[in-house]
Image: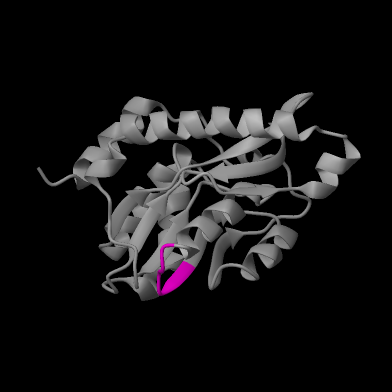
Amino acid sequence: MFRDRRDAGKKLAALLSRYRGKDSVVLAIPRGGVIIADEVCESLNAKIGLLMTKKIGAPSDQEAAIGAVSEDGSTVLDRELINDFSIPDRYIQKEKARQLKEIKRRLKKYLADKLDPEIGEKTVIIVDDGIATGLTTLCAIRYIRSLGPEKIIVATPVAPGDVVRQLENEADEVVVAETPAPFYAIGHFYGDFEQVSDREVLSIIRKYIKE
């Protein structure tokens, strides 16, 4: 479906072309979302920032999301899953603290404070390389909403249709290149979905930093 993240970013940027020159802010979710956002920013001539949200995984399977936490500590939890698996609150709080610490570490490592775009009364485009359950994206939307933007757009190359419909209830607009069914892991829809390195992220970020 997509050759790689650069290809996906170009296709997504084409869908966002009406925002070219509109003084928009693109917020990338590291790491893979930074490559997508780079293509979008170049196409739209937009400012870039970083937006960190981290998944809270289940005790028995860290890949299974039971919630998410954003950089201000706010959380979104899947209460149905938590109740189904009888996950204690002490585990959730411990995992939340661990992920929040990792968020702060990454924001510092990726020089996020040197970007720090103005969010208030702006059109904000939240970009990731794909959305699966939508929990981390939902967490990101609610955090950014608290900062007072004029409009929030979620943009991603690929996501399940049912998740897109859920996110449309929270964001002002959701832009997705493909909504395949059945939906598999995000990487299934990329020819090349190698993990993005910290070095790659920093290389992109430094292009946008004004010394």
142, 32: nearer the viewer:
142
Residue 114 inside the magenta-drawn segment: no
Quadrant where the C terminus sits is top left
Instruction: Give residue 201's quadrant in the image.
Output: top left
In this picture, which residue range is highlighted in magenta? 147-152
Give coordinates of residue 146: x percent, y percent. Answer: 47, 63
- The residue depicted at 44 percent of the width and 30 percent of the height is 196
Instruction: Give the farthest residue toward the right.
Output: 84
Instruction: Give residue 69's quadrant in the image.
Output: top right
- The residue depicted at 48 percent of the width and 29 percent of the height is 101
**What is the count of numbered marks?**
0
Give coordinates of residue 110: x percent, y percent. Answer: 32, 34
7, 167: nearer the viewer:
167
- The residue depicted at 13 percent of the width and 47 percent of the height is 210
Above or below for 56 versus 183: above
Please give left or right for residue 184 compared with residue 108 in the image.
Answer: right
Please give left or right for residue 83 compared with residue 185 in the image.
Answer: right
Say how the picture is coloured. Answer: one colour
Give coordinates of residue 97: x percent, y percent. Answer: 56, 31
Instruction: Give the farthest residue toward the top.
Output: 60
97, 183: nearer the viewer:
97
Please give left or right for residue 114 compared with residue 80 in the image.
Answer: left
Give coordinates of residue 10: x percent, y percent. Answer: 40, 55
Q: Is residue 2 visible?
A: yes
Q: Is residue 63 visible?
A: no
